[in-house]
Image (cartoon, rainbow, N blue to C red):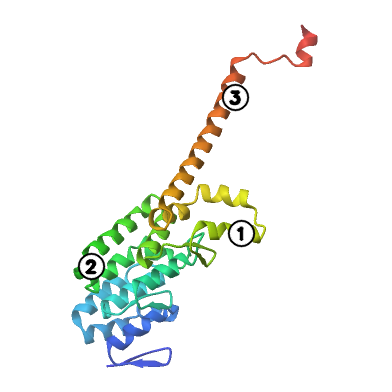
Amino acid sequence: MAITIEEKTYDDIFALAKDLSLGKESYAKALRSPEVLSFIREEDSYKGKRADALSLSSLPDDVFLFRMQEILNPFLPFAFHGKVYETYADLGRDILASSPTPSPFLLPILRYHLVSEHMKTSGYEKDHVEESRKVSEIENEDKEDSTYSYFALGYYLSGSKSFFYQGVEYENLYNFTYYLIKKETDLNALGTFLGSSSLLEAYGDYGNEKALVKEYLHLCKEVDRSEENLLSFQEKRKSSYPQKPSQGEKKKL
């Protein structure tokens, strides 16, 4: 038996699995069809049962294709949203390239824990237990702060110690700020943004300047706390004094 998708004929599930990395919507639709599911069952009954179950899910197409590819051939490189990553480090660098905000196309990788899933199904986990454990730990932090977890995953997988901003890699924060000064960037606004930035927090945990970044973030929090305390103090002082009567009230008196 053979099947045809987009004018391409497949006579085995391994050739089909490889093309799922293209991330095409038409493939996601085809792999939910009775004809293609029947083809998979005929080729491999166990994989066919798993494919049947997956076809009933309401997963986003990219995640659906990723998991279907894992079923058909779990030993292929990590592939998502039409891109194949030969190494996890390549994926990590692609994640960092989207800074200062997560890529909406790559964020599902974190939300659905696809990296640790791939490490397990591909057999990578067996020889890299600690790395797999750490990836799973980062993925689970998504519930607390998805932006931090996104960039932490990028740093951990890539092994990079540099600071990434708008697709550019800087060796350190000094080089980053020097470049921005030359561009006459509003450093006050940028400083305010970075002071509460999960990107900078992730860089502080995995980059070259851990102590410097942690000190900066600590100072930013102290400044914010001081401002809050001052506003609170002003409100208390205001409420402790009687309100002055308006002009109309004075006339009535």
Tell me which residue sits at (49%, 37%) in the image: 222
Label 2, label 3: how far apart the Cα atoms are: 56 Å
Q: Position of residue 30 (x, y in %)?
A: 38, 81
Quick one: label 2, few (<14), some, or many (20+) residues within 10 Å?
A: few
Q: Indicate which disc, 1 or 2, sits on the residue closer to the N terminus.
A: 2
Quick one: label 3, few (<14), some, or many (20+) residues within 10 Å?
A: few
Q: Circle 1 is placed at which residue position?
A: 180
Secondary structure under badge 3?
helix
* Image quadrant assignment for residue 232: top right
Secondary structure under badge 1?
helix
Q: Position of residue 151 (x, y in %)?
A: 42, 59
Q: Indicate which disc, 2 or 3, sits on the residue closer to the N terminus.
A: 2
Quick one: label 1, few (<14), some, or many (20+) residues within 10 Å?
A: some
**Camera-side mark, 1 or 2:** 1
Please state which amino acid type lies under the numbered disc 1.
Leu
Q: Circle 3 is placed at which residue position?
A: 234
Count of marks placed on residues: 3
Tell me: 129 left or right of 251. left
Find the residue positioned furthest to the top: 253
Please state which amino acid type lies under the numbered disc 2.
His
